[in-house]
Amino acid sequence: MTSLIRWDPFREAMSLRNAIDRLFEESFVSPRFGWLAPLGAADVAIDMYETKDQVVVKAALPGIKPEQTEVTITGNTLTIRGEAKEEKEIKEENYICRERRMGAFSRSIALPDGLKTDKAEATFENGVLTLTIPKAEEKKAKTIKIKTK
């Protein structure tokens, strides 16, 4: 036995409207990838960890040369800036796929307290920027030996 369901055109219209709204929100309002998203902070992946004597920050900057990058520390804020230059030898109409983004980028991250930022060192190898910042003496963990009587 089959049942009859009354057709409600507004029920289906609302689901189509919701689908179109979601499509526009995901595509144009908050682009994450693709041709609409500029090269920005989200494109600079950063790892930060600490050892006994220092804090290490690693930033992935594929295709960027060290001379295109600037690292500054102001207070407890580390800022990595740079610009990816576009290759001019390929004409726009010859592209089949274009996913690498060019232009200026900047990423800031808060550093922990108690670092000797004036003693920071930066190295660049295989597209990875590594910044090592030594800890101040008062912030280093000290082991206290327990004496027995």
Image (tube, rainbow, N blue to C red):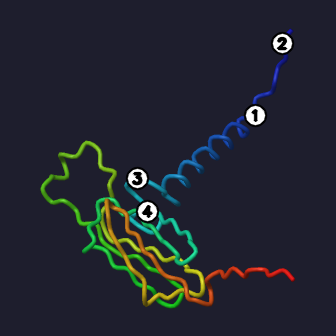
Say which residue appears at 57% left-offset and 46% top-offset.
20
Say which residue appears at 54% left-offset and 83% top-offset.
135
Earlier-in-chain disc, 2 versus 4: 2
Q: Secondary structure at mark 1?
A: loop
Q: Is residue 31 left or right of residue 21?
A: left
Earlier-in-chain disc, 2 versus 3: 2
Front residue (pair 66, 139): 139
Question: Which residue is disc 4 drawn over?
Answer: 43
Earlier-in-chain disc, 1 versus 4: 1
Q: Which mark is residue 8?
A: 1
- How far apart in space, not on screen, are marks 1 and 3 (Cα)? 38 Å
Front residue (pair 59, 35): 59
Question: Which residue is disc 2 drawn over?
Answer: 2
Percent x, y for residue 31? 48, 57
Percent x, y for residue 61? 36, 63
Question: Which residue is disc 3 drawn over?
Answer: 34
- The answer to whether residue 67 is above or below residue 7 is below
Kind of residue at disc 2: Thr
Say which residue appears at 38% left-offset and 68% top-offset.
129
Which dot, 1 or 3, sits closer to the camera? Answer: 3
- How far apart in space, not on screen, are marks 1 and 4 (Cα)? 46 Å
- How far apart in space, not on screen, are marks 4 and 3 (Cα)? 12 Å
Kind of residue at disc 3: Gly
Which dot, 4 or 3, sits closer to the camera? Answer: 4
- How far apart in space, not on screen, are marks 2 and 1 (Cα)? 18 Å
Which dot, 2 or 4, sits closer to the camera? Answer: 4
The N terminus appears in which quarter of the rendering?
A: top right
Front residue (pair 7, 126): 126
- The answer to whether residue 81 is above or below residue 98 is below
Q: Secondary structure at mark 4?
A: helix
